[in-house]
Image: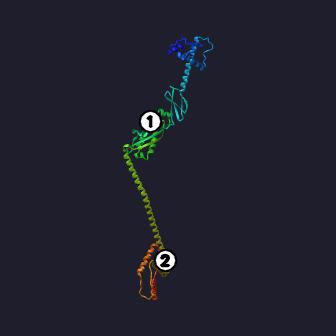
């Protein structure tokens, strides 16, 4: 570019014939040495030549020779060539910068999505990748390993409730307040970016739809107590089915119930009802515990009575059978010797009778017909004997010895006994 035109463009009023300008060995105008920077305007022509020389040295373009035979025309042609080289270098640098703008890096756990003129082209793995720069291609990096969370019924804090999302109607026509969080990951980043306009809002709406359907088929007590985990699991399954139909590219990993309770307006009455139900269950448990204690005891007593009755029946039957067998044996012996058998039976019977009664023996040999029986002492002695038997089994009371009767009396009694024995044998 000529210096005059450059000066005119820059608005410089410095003339080329100004004595402050000189010529170098190539015939180019330059500022004279020894001039201070403050004495005139900056040496723009010299700066331009230095810039051209550096570019020529960089690209190996030597358009000047050591001979100084060139005139002013050759100097102007060199400047034009230097300007062309400069423009080419700038163009090359701009091209390199433009091509370098297509490079991008994808971190581990992410995927790069490349589009060509706005249409999906291909996916790129983790690492250094390159695409055609703008306006031909563009890229977007999507984190597929991040666990994303969508809150339904609240925002940020469970106290910050969203009534339009949390209030739901159960199958038994009760209103329940539910807050829960949905965690998900991206299974298909292309579908996540291009199949839905607002993918995160879509997940929130799908979560609200699924929970309302599950709660609408359940009772209030089931959702509040024993069915909370089941409701969360069913909601997760139903959400995944809906998102798969929408081709959203999201995979539900977990549904967490943050709060399940009746509305605040009826919370007090509901708490009273819950306490009443708990009291009812407590009383039922106490009654069941008492029944578990009493019923086995009664069954044990009944079983014991049955066993005792069975034992008594067996004892009676065995005794009767034994007596019958004994009677048959005695009958057999009686048939062999009736007299001896009768005497033995008589003696055995008398032995049993006298073994359990008090005996008084009278001695008639004293020769006195008057007998004195101390009945008061005998009765006292019998009472003491019975008291001792009540504590410890004692032998029968000893016989009271009285004077022996006379020999004739004894013989008479003996004779009467023999006669009675003979009379029994005669029978």
The residue at the point 55 percent across, 24 percent down is 96
Quick check: 210 above or below 406? Answer: above
Q: Which mark is residue 202?
A: 1
Q: Where is residue 305 shown, x and y percent of the image?
A: 44, 65
**Camera-side residue of 410 and 397:** 397
Q: Is residue 284 visible?
A: yes
**Marks 1 & 2, CB-CB < 8 Å contact:** no
The residue at the point 42 percent across, 78 percent down is 380
Asked whether, in this view, residue 246 is left or right of residue 83, the answer is left
Q: Secondary structure at mark 1?
A: helix
Q: Could you tell me how far apart the alpha carbons at marks 1 and 2 are, in whole angstroms?
A: 108 Å
Asked whether, in this view, residue 265 is left or right of residue 117, the answer is left
Classed neighbour count for the residue bearing mark 2: other residues with Cα under 10 Å, few (<14), some (14–19), many (≥20): some
Q: Where is residue 111 shown, x and y percent of the image?
A: 52, 33
- Identify the residue at the far right of this view: 67
Between label 1 and label 2, give the one nearer the viewer.
1
Quick check: 325 above or below 232? Answer: below
**Camera-side residue of 395 and 228:** 395
Q: Where is residue 163 shown, x and y percent of the image?
A: 39, 39
Query: Mark 2 highlights which residue?
Result: 330
Asked whether, in this view, residue 169 is left or right of residue 114, the answer is left
Q: Quadrant of residue 265?
A: top left
Q: Which mark is residue 40?
A: none
């Amino acid at each position: 570019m000529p210096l005059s035109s450059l000066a005119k463009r820059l608005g410089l009023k410095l003339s080329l014939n100004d004595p402050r300008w000189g010529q170098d060995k190539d015939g180019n105008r330059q500022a004279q040495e020894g001039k201070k920077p403050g004495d005139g305007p900056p040496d723009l022509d010299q700066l331009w030549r230095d810039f051209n020389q550096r570019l020529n040295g960089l690209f190996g373009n030597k358009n000047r020779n050591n001979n100084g035979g060139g005139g002013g025309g050759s100097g102007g042609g060199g400047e034009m060539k230097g300007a062309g080289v400069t423009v080419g270098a700038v163009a090359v640098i701009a091209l390199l910068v433009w091509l370098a703008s297509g490079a991008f890096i994808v971190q581990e756990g992410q995927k790069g999505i490349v589009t060509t003129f706005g249409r999906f082209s291909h996916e790129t793995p983790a690492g250094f990748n390159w695409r055609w720069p703008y306006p031909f291609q563009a890229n977007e990096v999507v984190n597929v390993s991040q666990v994303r969370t969508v809150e339904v019924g609240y925002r940020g804090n469970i106290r910050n409730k969203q009534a339009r999302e949390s209030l739901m109607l159960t199958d038994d026509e009760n209103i329940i307040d539910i807050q829960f969080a949905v965690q998900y990951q991206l299974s298909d980043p292309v579908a996540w970016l291009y199949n839905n306009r607002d993918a995160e809002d879509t997940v929130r709406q799908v979560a609200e739809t699924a929970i309302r359907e599950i709660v609408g088929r359940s009772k209030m007590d089931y959702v509040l107590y024993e069915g909370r985990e089941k409701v969360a699991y069913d909601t997760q399954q139903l959400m995944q089915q809906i998102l798969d139909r929408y081709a959203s590219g999201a995979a539900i990993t977990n549904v967490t119930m943050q709060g399940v309770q009746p509305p605040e307006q009826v919370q007090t009455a509901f708490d009273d009802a819950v306490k009443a139900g708990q009291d009812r269950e407590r009383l039922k448990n106490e009654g069941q515990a008492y029944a578990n204690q009493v019923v086995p005891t009664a069954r044990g007593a009944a079983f014991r009575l049955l066993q005792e009755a069975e034992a008594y029946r067996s004892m009676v039957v065995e005794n009767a059978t034994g007596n019958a067998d004994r009677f048959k044996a005695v009958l057999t012996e009686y048939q062999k010797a009736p007299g001896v058998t009768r005497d033995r039976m008589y003696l055995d019977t008398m032995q049993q009778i006298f073994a359990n009664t008090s005996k008084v023996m009278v001695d008639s040999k004293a020769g006195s017909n008057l007998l004195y029986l101390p009945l008061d002492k005998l009765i006292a002695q019998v009472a003491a004997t019975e008291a001792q038997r009540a504590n410890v089994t004692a032998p029968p009371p000893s016989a009271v010895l009285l004077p022996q009767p006379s020999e004739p009396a004894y013989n008479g009694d003996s004779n009467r006994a023999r006669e009675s024995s003979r009379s029994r044998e005669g029978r």
